[in-house]
Amino acid sequence: MQKKILAAVVASMMAGQAMAVTLVDDGTNKATIGGYLDLRYIDQDKGEHTGDSSRINFAFEHKMTEATTVFAKTEWGFDTTGDKDDYFWQRLAYVGAKNDQLGSIAYGQQWSTYGMVAGWTDVFAATGGEASGFYGADGDALGTARAEDALQYNHSFMGLNVSAQYQVGEESVDTNETRDGSYAVAASYDLPMGLSIGAAYNEAKVEVTGANGYKAKSAIVGAKFEADKIYAALTYADLKNRETSDYLGAVEKAEGIELYASYQLNEMFKIGGGYNQLKDKSNTTGIKGEVKYIPVEVVYTQGPVQLSGTYQFEDSVMHTTGAKAEDKIVLQARYYF
């Protein structure tokens, strides 16, 4: 029972679909609506109320044969505070097909192949995920986060999970910079005792107007353990030519470590903590930024409601000024639908 609860909590953090409402299910066609309203109060330097993590999604399936199903999903983020110019923005939009023996193939904006491993430590209630190369300012365009224009294949058999991805066409990365295709591969293996090990690699070709282009490379290895009330995961990432964090800016080389561990006290309460560190390893002079913090959290889940409190011990350094970040407190209220 506890293992099922923990799996549901982790899945809801990753996809926001655990509490989805089924609109239609006649055995052949299925349609669901899901998402959540997320409000946070962040106290760091000054108090700030945010609501831009909220989202709504629609998912559809059509069973063609006993073994083959076609599917589609679209998801939008929305802001509940009125602070953003765009109240709605696209997060996911893809179509595909899956077969019990052959795996699945999908095209569109979707969670990346790189995320097969990077997502293992991105399960904090209200923080984390900053040292693996998963997100960053360029994650969607380069294919490591919610990969845009991506053709992706996934399959699992006998404990082995494989994924391959290719981004089609060109996409703006930054001013005067354009991604001209990318590819990614990943594999993980699930052992019977709850331990999984995995690795992923993503490489994108970026063209620069009036200058030489470059290749953005992201490699990650990791392990996770799930058993009854315990969840623990560790990832190590090696990144080249990525814009990974506000603290580092655009860097030639960076190395990141993420750690997360939690214990399910009962059906409602979970305690968790971890570590995020991303270091600038570029051969440059001057101030080098660094992401470095330890979050400790308490999460309460009851039905569709999730409440959490996080205290983040900070030691991050801003690359522009050398200033150190102050400790952070995050209070979160989330309602799944």
Image (tube, grey):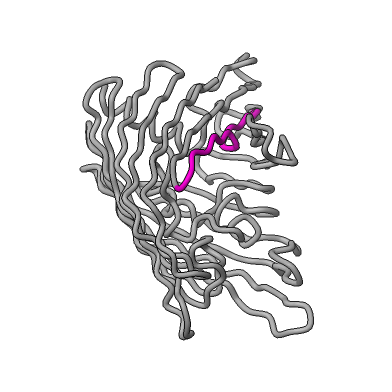
For the view shown, which residue lies furthest in the right direction? 210
Q: Which residues are magenta?
A: 45-60
* Residue 259 visible somewhere in the drawing: no
Q: Quadrant of the C terminus?
A: top right
Indicate the quadrant where residue 173 lies: bottom right
* Residue 38 visible somewhere in the drawing: yes
Identify the main secondary structure in magenta: strand
| Magenta-drawn stretch contains 49 | yes
Q: Quadrant of the N terminus?
A: top left
Relative side of 149 to 321, left or right: right
Residue 261 to residue 266: above or below:
below
For the view shown, which residue lies furthest in the front direction? 46
Please name the residue shown 70% across and 85% down the image: 212
Q: Position of residue 66 (x, y in %)?
A: 56, 28
Q: Position of residue 306 (x, y in %)?
A: 42, 24
Between residue 145 and residue 126, name the one nearer to us.
126
Relative side of 307 to 4, left or right: right
Q: Position of residue 254 (x, y in %)?
A: 44, 72
Please name the residue shown 66% across and 54% down the image: 150
Please name the residue shown 41% across and 54% down the image: 117
Relative side of 36 to 329, left or right: right
Please name the residue shown 50% across and 22% down the image: 335
| Magenta-drawn stretch contains 247 | no
